[in-house]
Image: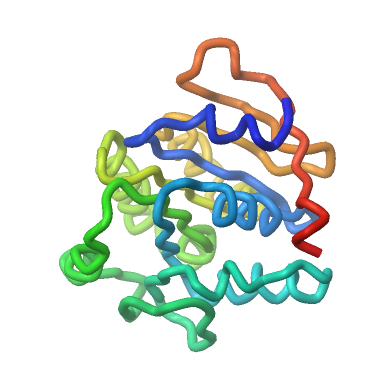
Amino acid sequence: MKSRDLSDLFKVGETVLVEYTGTSRPELFLYHLVTSSGLPVVIDDVLDTYYEFYTRLKVSGVDVTPLEDVRVIKMGGTRDVGKVLGRLNISKYIISEKEYMAIIKQIGEYPFLNPVLGVHKLVLLGNILENMNIVKMVSNYVGNKERVAFYFINKNVILKHSPPLLDLLEEVATSVIEVTDSGIIVKKSIKNGAGGKIISLFLNQDSR
């Protein structure tokens, strides 16, 4: 499969788990989502993860202008990229869902694409009970027809800190994909026959 086929894999209301490691390049997949989606994009940025993705793309020579126009909800951190809709403080790990929903209401365009970057950083900050709240939060939004959510996680971080959490997140997600050097591996999908496929991921030469 080619990267253009990605848009056919996911439906409105889905929650997609995007797994990667410290040596893979999840920023390429994020760039593809932002530049190829026909939906408005709103990024949840946990502790400056969006800035990290943005910087790696910029250093590699990619035209990052599209990323600078994306709407962003900041969850902790101090480095801004994109048009910041609002900020949520991370105090003792807790994020106020009420404050989050108040910011979401500003969007006014539905459905929207919602990449969530840096969830694994929250896992590092939390204890077992708090990490279970992450699973509950993800589960609560499954089937929400206002968005398509993509939760980007460094799976090695979670496996070293809280191994059972990865299985729980994979279970509640409607689709699970992994970003590798070979491309994107579809590990789980609600689309029949999609599981196990590898999708090549490349940037159009005009983006460089």
Q: Residue furthest front?
A: 206
Instruction: Report the front residue among 171 and 161.
Output: 171
Q: In the displayed structure, would residue 189 be above or below residue 10?
A: above
Residue 91 visible in image: no
Q: In the displayed structure, would residue 146 be above or below residue 105?
A: above
Residue 129 in the image: x percent, y percent? 33, 54
Residue shown at the point (17%, 69%) measured from the top left:
102
Q: How many marks?
A: 0
Colour convention: rainbow
Residue 5 visible in image: yes
Taking the image as shown, residue 183 lies to the left or right of residue 44, namely right
- The C terminus: image quadrant: bottom right
Residue shown at the point (43%, 34%) measured from the top left:
173
Residue 47 in the image: x percent, y percent? 50, 75
- The N terminus: image quadrant: top right
Q: In the displayed structure, would residue 30 be above or below residue 61?
A: above
Taking the image as shown, residue 156 lies to the left or right of residue 43, namely right
Q: Residue furthest top?
A: 193
Residue shown at the point (30%, 46%) measured from the top left:
111
Quarter of the rendering containing residue 31: bottom right
Residue 56 in the image: x percent, y percent? 74, 71
Residue 55 in the image: x percent, y percent? 70, 76
Q: Residue furthest bottom?
A: 78
Quarter of the rendering containing residue 136: top left
Residue shown at the point (75%, 42%) measured from the top left:
201
